[in-house]
Structure formats: C-alpha cells, structure tokens
Amino acid sequence: MKKRRNYLTILSVVGLIFLCGIVFNVRGIRDFYVAMFAHMSNIWVLAPAALVAFIFIDNKNYWMIVLGLAVVDSLAVQIYVGNGFPIMLLISRVCAFVGIVFLMNMTKVFMSK
C-alpha cells in the first residue's frame, strides 16, 4: 500500500506542476512538457526505457541505474542525431526516459494486487 501511495503522490505532484504551467501560461514549463511528451513517443527513448524497466527490476539501486542509463541513452541519441548538446533537450529526454520507467513500474505495482 505504501508503494501505491508513493507512486500516486509523485504522479499528482508532476500533474499539478503541468496544470499550473498550462493554467498560468508559464511558457518554460509548457514547452518542457511538450518536448518531454514528444520524446516519450520516440522509439530511441521508448525501447531502451522499456528494456531497462524490466531488466534491473530487482536491483537494490534501481532508480540510480535508471537515471544513469537515461543520461547515457540521451547522450547517445544526441550524438547520433548530431544537433549539438542543448541542455533542455537532454534534460527533457532524460525525464521522458525516467517517466516511461516510472509509468511502467506504477502499472506493475497496481496490477500486482
């Protein structure tokens, strides 16, 4: 039950920040979420995130590994695409990676009981 509450708390805080960005018309927050959701549908982010979500599931330092691999994946895609290294693009891609893993783990927690 505690895991469910933690996942729902994190999801509600992220949703609240997203809604505040839309309601108060904060362009930086809105543009960041648009970029992050665009990266979530990118196969170069989606496939490694799904793979990582299940391979390292029983590891003690699971979220540290996920964050490290998200940075590695983001840098690898950025080198492959060759657009330079704009920091907001890298951060939005890392957040998309971690977001996919978070959503997959949340559905696993909710489906398990």
Image (cartoon, rainbow, N blue to C red):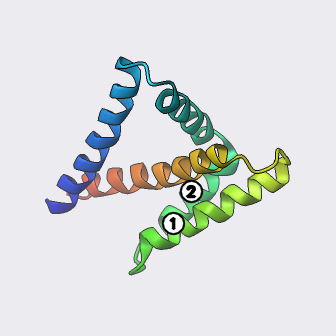
- Look at mark 2 in the image and give the residue it sits on: 49
Whether residue 46 is visible = no
> In the rendering, which numbered label is found on residue 113?
none
* Residue for point 47% across, 55% down: 101
Of badges 2 and 1, nearer the viewer stands 1
- Above or below, 45 relative to 71: above
Using residue 56 as the reference point, say whether residue 39 is left or right of it: right
Q: Are marks 2 and 1 in contact (CB under 8 Å)?
A: no
Quick one: quadrant of the N terminus? Answer: bottom left
- Labels 2 and 1: the sequence-earlier one: 2
- At label 2, the amino acid type is Ala
Seen as rendered, the residue at the extreme left is 1
Question: Residue 43: percent from the left, percent from the top?
Answer: 68, 45
Question: Residue 100: percent from the left, percent from the top?
Answer: 49, 49
Question: Residue 19: percent from the left, percent from the top?
Answer: 34, 26
Using residue 56 as the reference point, say whether residue 24 is left or right of it: left
